Amino acid sequence: MSGENGRVAVRSEMRWNGWGEPARASDLPRAVRMLLPLLLGRVRKPAAAVDLAEVRLEPSSLQEDDLQELGSIVGAEHVETADESRIRHAGGRSTPDLLRRRRCEQASPDAVVLPGSHAEVVDVLRACAGRGIAVIPFGGGTSVVGALDPERGAHRGVISLDLRRLSGLIRLDEVSREACIAAGTTGPDAEALLAAQGFELGHYPQSFRYATIGGFAAARSSGQNSAGHGRFDSMVTGLRVATPTGDIELGRSPGSAAGPDLIRVFLGSEGIFGVITEVRVRVHPVPRERILEAWRFPDFPQGVDGLRLVTQNGGGPTVIRLSDEAETAVSLAQVGRIGKALTTGASIVTVYEGDGIAERRARTSEILTAAGGVSSGEGAAEGWLDGRFDGPYLRDSLLDAGVFCETLETATTWSNLKHLRTEITATLRRGFAEAGARSYVMCHVSHVYPTGASLYFTVLANLRSDPLEAWAGIKRQVNDSIISAGGTISHHHAVGRDHAPWLEQEIGETGVRILAAIKRELDPTWILNPGAVITSDRAGRRG
Amino acid sequence: MSGENGRVAVRSEMRWNGWGEPARASDLPRAVRMLLPLLLGRVRKPAAAVDLAEVRLEPSSLQEDDLQELGSIVGAEHVETADESRIRHAGGRSTPDLLRRRRCEQASPDAVVLPGSHAEVVDVLRACAGRGIAVIPFGGGTSVVGALDPERGAHRGVISLDLRRLSGLIRLDEVSREACIAAGTTGPDAEALLAAQGFELGHYPQSFRYATIGGFAAARSSGQNSAGHGRFDSMVTGLRVATPTGDIELGRSPGSAAGPDLIRVFLGSEGIFGVITEVRVRVHPVPRERILEAWRFPDFPQGVDGLRLVTQNGGGPTVIRLSDEAETAVSLAQVGRIGKALTTGASIVTVYEGDGIAERRARTSEILTAAGGVSSGEGAAEGWLDGRFDGPYLRDSLLDAGVFCETLETATTWSNLKHLRTEITATLRRGFAEAGARSYVMCHVSHVYPTGASLYFTVLANLRSDPLEAWAGIKRQVNDSIISAGGTISHHHAVGRDHAPWLEQEIGETGVRILAAIKRELDPTWILNPGAVITSDRAGRRG
């Protein structure tokens, strides 16, 4: 796998209209198939998805001289205009993205450009700015918030800038435990390169198998081990970024008071200010030991209190997550036990990795027991660990069966967490009911902080009307509900285009003005990912 | 002390030309007096400092109608034009600041304005923008980087905006362990208000007794307990800021991917983008237990390795700091042992507070012992704890005795730490030698991160020529040396005016352009702290 400079060359392609590799796709587990009618009533199987060969695209709007200049920068073989490549870069992997892929007409970028170095990224940006071509930076293609929509803004064309050739471990400082990783490196490639030298990054979001290091940074990702290693923001110690008007290298020191921390301007910028080409991160030795333990709580609110006490008392698990009653029931569903499963309370999974895990487990166990939890041993936690990257495959199977399935997430303070969950759940249920559908809403808490935690919802529904249109309306109501109930519009999926209209309610008019001012300075012709994060009506405004 | 809304009304005034309260000032300890000739040779006592009554100021450039409008906003009694108030707001507490105070002519703001609410801050900014009056936000007055110089930029006058009336605990969320504190609250007042409810912030920089919560945020402060509680950046969960063109409230959730973290735009902005009026911070229960322990290492490099191993293996002390041989010798100097003291290796102080301190100490002790350290018990650590806020008093006594004394600081990765210290030490020694002075350079490491640590230097010298001019030249060389040897221009003192010319080397031309773009958006007439962070030659430039 590993070539020159520890660079990784080959990568498995995701299905164009679903998650992951076709070989890993699976039918609905029998237990889920038996459970669905209980939860949702009758589900109607949709029309079969279209084949890649049936897809029709608009002709590329780029001219021969556009392609020639781009080819002169990255090599002609790294400028792709074939339909298949354009389709594969046409968006991310939200449920609406996948539902749109079931149709014959697809919006797509006019070309896909694959630069091989930071300098080539710089030159591509300069060329596109000069030619009036929008640029959508593309990592693993796993966005679920519309950050990869081929929106051209005011420009005459749009390219997808695929960073996969910027792959590899650039430097490892073993003493400082800091690694510099090329932005297009996928999660598994980064971990493999680090593991070969005894280190781990330890960032495992559900998109881990496909998403890239640069994407984690650009979208402020948070992984399943966040209780132990923090969210990706906190792992980043430096960045190299190419913008249309100049380069920037940040992160001279692990702590600094040299003005505002500009790394944080690019973390979460989702490609609107520049293209992240290198990311420096802290790493730690590959953990030698792991303990798993699942816990059962009488209900979700008591489980939340347990989570909070563990978090606020510090030094505990590497992973800690709480599923509510609805999610617990489904995850425990087994053939022959359907029905019984729905009354089993809320479950917590804990994982301990690294040093001192026996002590850390003992301390955590004591707190969880005092909070009303009962250990249910290793088994349930193993089940979670084995399937932790496979949720999106299950969604594909559900969509194939005609079950609408989508996720959304937010975060708030501990004191507001139960209220926010109640509000969002009620909004989801009401929205589906108004659309004439039965729904089943599940929730878990998977990222914890001293002052609060995340909420992650999975919803299943037997939507009969056009699910794209129905969900768009429900999602709008949920976003309003998140804002009015004090949550953040996204804890780790980011803003993209889907959440951009709500960002002003989160950071205020002044906050959006700050983002727009940075955007105008770095990308004055607004070529970078137009419409993402900042709604495109801002593009024309000044001040 | 505490009034309406838990607000604190009374505050002790610092000496106008030195540190802290006159009652706490002290003569040089006898041991230090005996040691000085050994270290520096003969020192010449300087002319006595001038009295406050001898100081001459330029007349205030503000007009009657300026003062009337400001008075109509904050109340006439909160607009001060008396010389004493203007002198007390004429700068910070760096050694150059104090040396300048020994002269009769003093630059000063034209008036001191004390707003009583966020709304009054907003109105003062609007009035000053309209009238072309610069505004220097003023917290505790403890800046050591020239952030409080009464620079008016292109404006016809300048006021000091003293935030002391914005004082108190606004809200405490005990469940989420989050407190909202008015920006003008001093460190001791904030801790007293929180302690009354069982909580602690735990931020103890050397300026703690005078500096304010808003100042900690604006300058990206780091406190002595940073190993346990993190630097101030990491404590902040929300901000309220008044800018000349609009308000902003940030921090809806403990973790978020809703675009870039704009809190970080204001942390470290040193009043150039807006005036921080409220700060939300995470707090923790007042620790019930404390263990102190000092350690001795053969030399500084071995001590650094010990520090690194403790930090990278996690979960250890609340405070850990390492003094090099030179600092160890002076701090241990005792009458009757002068001479012997200079060969005692490097010392580490550790403090453990909070839960599980016995385990944490055991784990730390094991690592330090394996790294070549020997415990020297509680005594030396107690000495550090007792005197930890008193360094600036000692500096006053040294200056009175004619000994030049100043501090500076930086940070870098673990792998570069020893090199950076060697370079800075050499630059300091060479600089003083070229100025014809003997010098004594001490260094400690007091803030640690998984990937690196800070370096804090204290230098003593028998400068005979004009110390202000000589030091300005040496400090320039040190700043160059920090940049060329890979350090940050400041780890926790911030940029102010003193480091502003070096910021571009740290964050690049593109970085400075980002800051200037935000500045132009929020403060288009450039009234806020002109010349701080961004050098004033930027004010005119676009792009």
Image (cartoon, coloured by chain):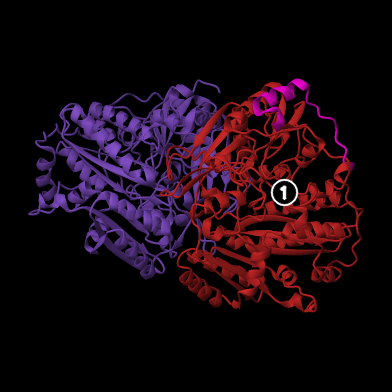
Chain colours: A purple, B red
Left or right of B362 in this view: B148: right
* Location of residue A362 by image quarter: bottom left
- Residue A247: percent from left, percent from top: 57, 40
Magenta-colored stretch includes residue A481? no
Left or right of B162 in this view: A193: left
Q: Amino acid at mark 1?
A: Val
Left or right of B20 in this view: B314: left
Q: Residues within 10 Å of mark 1 (few under 14, many from 20)?
A: many
Residue B56 position (above or below residue B129): below
Left or right of A531 in this view: A125: right
Which image quarter holds the C terminus of chain A? top right
Can I make out residue A102 in this image? no
Q: Residue at x 43, y 50 (%)?
A: A231
Residue designated by label 1: B144
SS class, disc 1? loop
Using the image as rendered, state which of residue B122 and residue A209 is in the foreground: B122
Q: Which residues are magenta?
A: B54-78
Q: Chain of mark 1?
A: B
Extreme-left residue of the structure: A336
- Residue A318: percent from left, percent from top: 37, 59
Which image quarter holds the N terminus of chain A? bottom left
Residue A164 position (above or below residue B119): below
Using the image as rendered, state which of residue B126 and residue B230 is in the foreground: B126
Q: Residue at x 24, y 32 (%)?
A: A99
Using the image as rendered, state which of residue B336 and residue A534 is in the foreground: B336
Residue A479 position (above or below residue B236): above
Q: Residue at x 41, y 68 (%)?
A: A355
- Residue B408: percent from left, percent from top: 71, 55
